[in-house]
Image: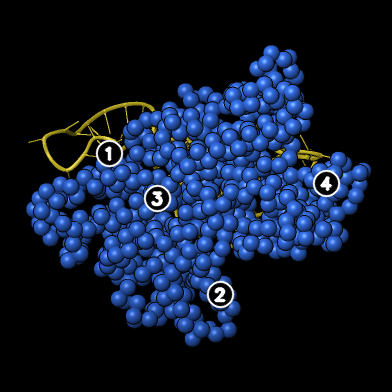
Chain colours: A blue, B yellow
Amino acid sequence: MTKQDIQRIIDSSIKAIVRNRDSFVDFPESIEVEVPKRREFGDFSTNVALVIAKKLGRKPREVAEVLIQNFPKEADALFKKIEVAGAGFINFFLRDEVIIEKLKEINRLGGEFGKSDLGRGERVIVEFVSANPTGYLHIGHARNAAFGDSLSNILSAVGFDVTKEFYINDAGRQIELLGLSVYRRYQELFGFEVDMPEDGYYGDYIRELAEEVKEIKGDSLLGEEESRAVEFCKEYAKDRLLEEIKKDLAAFGVVFDSWYSEYNELHRPLNRFGGKSRIEFVMDKLRQAGAVEEREGALWFKASDFGDSQDWVIIRRDGSPTYFLSDIAYHYDKVERGFKRLINVWGADHHSHVSRLKASFKALGLDDSCLQVVLIQFVRLMSGGEEISMSKRAGSYVSMREVMEEVGRDVMRFFLVMRSSESHLDFDLDLAKKESSENPVYYIQYAHARIGSVFEKARERGLFPSDKHLNLLTLPEEIDIIKKLIAFPEIVKESALSLSPHKLAFYLQGLASDFHVYYNRTRIIVEDFALSSARLYFINCIKTVIKNGLGLLGVSAPERM
RNA sequence: GCGCCCAUAGCUCAGCUGGACAGAGCAACGGCCUUCUAAGCCGUGGGUCGGGGGUUCGAAUCCCUCUGGGCGCGCCA
């Protein structure tokens, strides 16, 4: 019996009643049923009476009374009480037996509990991280990774067919600058005085890469034509950095289904386009659509014709395509590959790219509503109440790897998804390092481990969980917690639909808290054999939900701490 | 100047597809370990939901405006 089931019953009953008496009333398509915040308002609540009272010309409370009096008899099996409250809300109170019965379902489903078929197998591509292979990942990338991966898990759990993809910007100016920066440092190693490129990369890792190039090539690059030498440095540095990026992500528990190379997929000539590259192919389509225009020697996409605030250059005066054109081609390809929903996880600094990319969808005759962009706000690393400042270009930043080594993967992943993506996030290093209740991750994991430990004790005494005497679970806390457990699939769905993993994080904190309170107040293992078995069965369900929930966030659920 | 995001308890943040006295964690203060892990629990104090208008039976939630922050407005990505 999920919220939907309840909703259906309430919905159809109320509609039947209203249709009988006032068939002329223009009735809302669906009755809103919600779970009230406050316990005394019941397990479910609806505001129908308030909504239709005006149309009927009667007072909301009167309408509510009539509805209740005419509620079908079969509802008796489900509800112990249905009442009018407040301005005219109708509150429904479930029977305890109905609630307790649900434990069996949780137990039966185990690791599957929480899953649903909401997505009906629809193909979704979640593109995230997509960091340029021009440096190491930092805490911002880590937030993007934690978010994208958790969201992907959640979408899979609710029945979407999810592909996780990393788009590699391995073409273009930034990569060129990377190659040049490494080459200059390489020259430096041989005692040459060099000018670093103005927009180049200055981190220590550039020097390290130059050292590696020296080990491989000796001084032979010095004799080469510069463009060839830079080309070598570029390829080498890019591949090495990508390797490091993959290593960091793997250590973070993030595994991509697909690594999409801008160069290979978009810039290289492909047979299926008659020897044209995908970029050229899409370029032609834009031209055919009359969406481009030559101005000042460059080629512009007329985004302002398609809802954006301005036009954008897609082919520079020197004939090279901009990043934006690659992006158009890339997203066109996503649609061509058959994805029905495109979710992009971007840094908030890219927000202006949303409207121009949507404009390109329109120009290409695609439905832009399939594209959802989540903008992730910035992370501030805090230590001792001070912000640790970072600059990627200058190379002065704390890497994702360093933070992970310091606080561990579980803490880092949880911290990075426990806030709404649109909120700036202060990552408190001091708190993250604490192994105590102040740290929400340990708090939740501890609840799980505690249950594991109770089971160990129970086994020693020959006690095992059983569903034979669940009717002995009569404490109000027990009923309340079971209700919360039942709501878990609903929470997962909400997190999926609103693209908000943090909702799951909050839910788990609440559940862990409820358990700790219960644990402190109630002994699981008691003299009464039957009661013990019922309570063991009950807390095992809590354990299942915590484990499933943490799993979706990429956080482990240890048996022992 | 234009566009987007944000503003809720001392701090960090939920709540914002409108609903029934505004929540959590941390910090502060006072308690609880011979009994299943005290990485825990109990209690206390703490808020003009940035200001002002509007829509509504009802606004932290929607609209307008002002103020204060962040980001963007490249032939960089």
Q: Which residue is mark 1?
A: A561
Circle 3 SS class: helix
Disc with the residue nearer the chain's start (2 vs 3): 2
Q: Percent from the top left, x then y, of residue A70?
A: 40, 81
Disc with the residue nearer the chain's start (1 vs 4): 4
Disc with the residue nearer the chain's start (1 vs 3): 3
User: Label 1 marks which chain's residue?
Assistant: A
In the image, what residue type sits under mark 4? Ile
Question: What number is the disc on residue A29?
Answer: 2
Question: What number is the disc on residue A551?
Answer: 3
Q: Nearer the viewer, mark 4 or mark 2?
A: 4
Q: Residues within 10 Å of mark 4 (few under 14, many from 20)?
A: many
Q: Percent from the top left, x then y, of residue A549?
A: 39, 52
Disc with the residue nearer the chain's start (3 vs 4): 4
User: Label 4 marks which chain's residue?
Assistant: A
Asked if marks 4 and 2 fall on the same chain, the answer is yes
Quadrant into which the N terminus of chain A falls = bottom left
Circle 2 SS class: loop
Picture residue at 10% right of the left edge, 50% below the top: A461
Picture residue at 63% right of the left edge, 34% below the top: A236
Circle 1 SS class: loop
Q: Percent from the top left, x then y, of residue A232?
A: 68, 33
Picture residue at 38% right of the left edge, 81% below the top: A72
